[in-house]
Amino acid sequence: MDIVSIISGFFIFTGVFFIIVASIGVVRFPDFYSRIHPAGKCDTMGQAMVLIGLIIFELFTEGFNLISVKMFIIIAFIFIVNPTATHALANSALIMGLKPWTKDGKSEEYPSSEERQK
Amino acid sequence: MFSVAAIIIIVAMILVLYRAIQGPRICDRVLAVNVIGTKTVVLLALIGYIYERPHFMDIALVYALINFIATIAFLKYRETGRLD
């Protein structure tokens, strides 16, 4: 096993760790607003780490070509897009009237239509 | 190395699929679909290296674009009731 496989494998498996932590967080958090939090941050980070590992592997085996540029474009695009999408989700949930989670447990309810018109 | 990473990502996608089926609100389902789409981009990039066809990167790029457009379009429809 050469040094390139070790370095790119380190990046790839760190990214996979972040991705699986993000999915556990999406499954286990109690509220919608707290479920956005792993989806917005851990997922972006893990995706970037995996693709950086692939870029290093490509650069040291094949040399500089268009494939690594495309991977860099994907990284930059998802760094802009994924927080924007989660921000739009939180905004939409707030407009639809979803209450945030509180400690006493009775939280995740839409207000009724009469309450929303007040 | 790439195959092990791809299998772990598929397991993570199955975990998020639970939230997409079970989720109590429609916002949870949209969030789960968005997360699965991001993982699919990474999985397509890895598949390109597993089968030694790096031109799968084009498909991953297009899938990233489509995923964002789908989420934003659905949320706009949900907020305003129309798409124009």
Image (cartoon, rainbow, N blue to C red):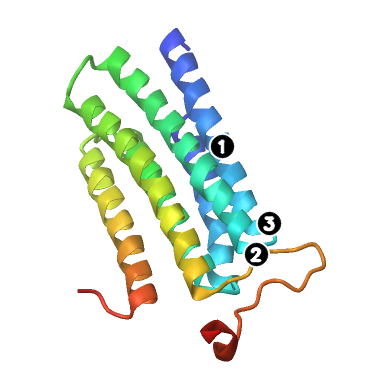
Tell me what residue is drawn at x 71 percent, y 71 percent.
A107
Chain hosting mark 1: A
Tell me what residue is drawn at x 50 percent, y 50 percent.
B10
Crowd tier of the residue under label 1, counting other residues whose Cα lies within 10 Å: few below 14, some 14–19, many 20 or above: many
Callout 2 and callout 3 share a chain = yes
The answer to which of A31 and A91 lies nearer the viewer is: A91
Question: On the image, numbered disc 3 is attached to which residue?
Answer: A28
In this picture, residue A106 sits left or right of residue B31: right
Q: Position of residue A116 (x, y in %)?
A: 55, 83
Chain hosting mark 2: A
Q: Position of residue A113 (x, y in %)?
A: 54, 89
Tell me what residue is drawn at x 23 percent, y 14 percent.
A63
Contact between marks 3 and 1 (CB within 8 A): the answer is no
Question: On the image, numbered disc 1 is attached to which residue?
Answer: A18
Q: Position of residue A18 (x, y in %)?
A: 56, 37
Q: Position of residue B29 (x, y in %)?
A: 50, 68
In this picture, residue A49 sits left or right of residue B19: left
Question: On the image, numbered disc 2 is attached to which residue?
Answer: A100
